[in-house]
Image (cartoon, rainbow, N blue to C red):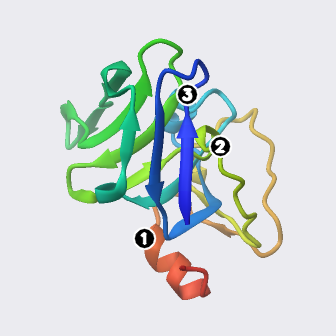
């Protein structure tokens, strides 16, 4: 499915091909909550970075969170791309998986199909004020699940 997205002020527009367009995976980690607009979680989709076309690329900013592992602080390999003018978080990619890109569902202008189930990941990091909106057939993970976004879609028979 071709996805098209943009920032709030319209200076950055992008498009890409996605085999995982269902907005199903809610991440409750503190980084996603703070960079995702304050809704309590962030919903990422999956896409092929090789098909990513960006208009207004000069307006893109790149945020890499500080992470601490084994007592050592470093910059994450996860790049969160945003509009420098309006601050809209648009998409992200990770150095470990350079062919993947994760557009933020709220930045997508293309109508997205609803997923019949959702995954709630990093549930253990959920802020106390975020309501529990899990449905009976949803999956919940206290931390990051071992199953990738692509494999979850494939296992569910949803991959295009």
- Is 8 or 116 nearer to us in this picture? 8
Write down the residue under mark 2.
Answer: 109
Find residue 113 and report its image quarter.
bottom right
Q: Earlier in the sequence, mark 3 or mark 1?
A: 3
- Is residue 55 depicted above or below 44 in this figure? above
Determine the residue positioned at 36% across, 50% down.
52
Q: Earlier in the sequence, mark 2 or mark 3?
A: 3
The N terminus appears in which quarter of the rendering? bottom right
Write down the residue under mark 3.
Answer: 7
| Residue 115 drawn at (x, y percent) | 72, 68
Cα distance, mark 2 to mark 3?
10 Å
Asked whether residue 16 appears in the rendered view, the answer is yes
| Residue 97 drawn at (x, y percent) | 25, 59
Asked whether residue 143 appears in the rendered view, the answer is no
80 on left or right of 133: left
Write down the residue under mark 1.
Answer: 148
Q: Nearer the viewer, mark 1 or mark 2?
A: 2
Q: Are marks 2 and 3 in contact (CB under 8 Å)?
A: no
- Is 59 or 155 nearer to us in this picture? 59
Cα distance, mark 3 to mark 1?
27 Å
Q: Residue furthest top?
A: 85
| Residue 23 drawn at (x, y percent) | 65, 58
Q: Which mark is residue 50?
A: none
């Amino acid at each position: 499915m071709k996805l098209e997205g943009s920032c709030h002020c319209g200076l950055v527009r992008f498009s890409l091909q996605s085999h995982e367009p269902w907005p199903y995976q809610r991440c409750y980690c503190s980084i996603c909550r703070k960079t995702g607009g304050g809704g309590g979680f962030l919903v990422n989709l999956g896409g092929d970075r090789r098909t990513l076309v960006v208009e207004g690329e000069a307006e893109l900013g790149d945020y890499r969170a500080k992470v601490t592992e084994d007592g050592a602080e470093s910059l994450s390999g996860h790049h969160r791309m945003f509009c420098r003018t309006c601050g809209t978080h648009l998409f992200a990619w990770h150095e470990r998986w350079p062919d993947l890109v994760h557009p933020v569902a709220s930045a997508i202008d293309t109508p997205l199909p609803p997923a019949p189930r959702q995954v709630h990941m990093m549930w253990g990091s959920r802020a106390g004020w975020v309501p529990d909106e899990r449905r009976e057939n949803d999956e919940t993970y206290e931390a990051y699940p071992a199953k990738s976004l692509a494999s979850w879609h494939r296992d569910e028979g949803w991959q295009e």
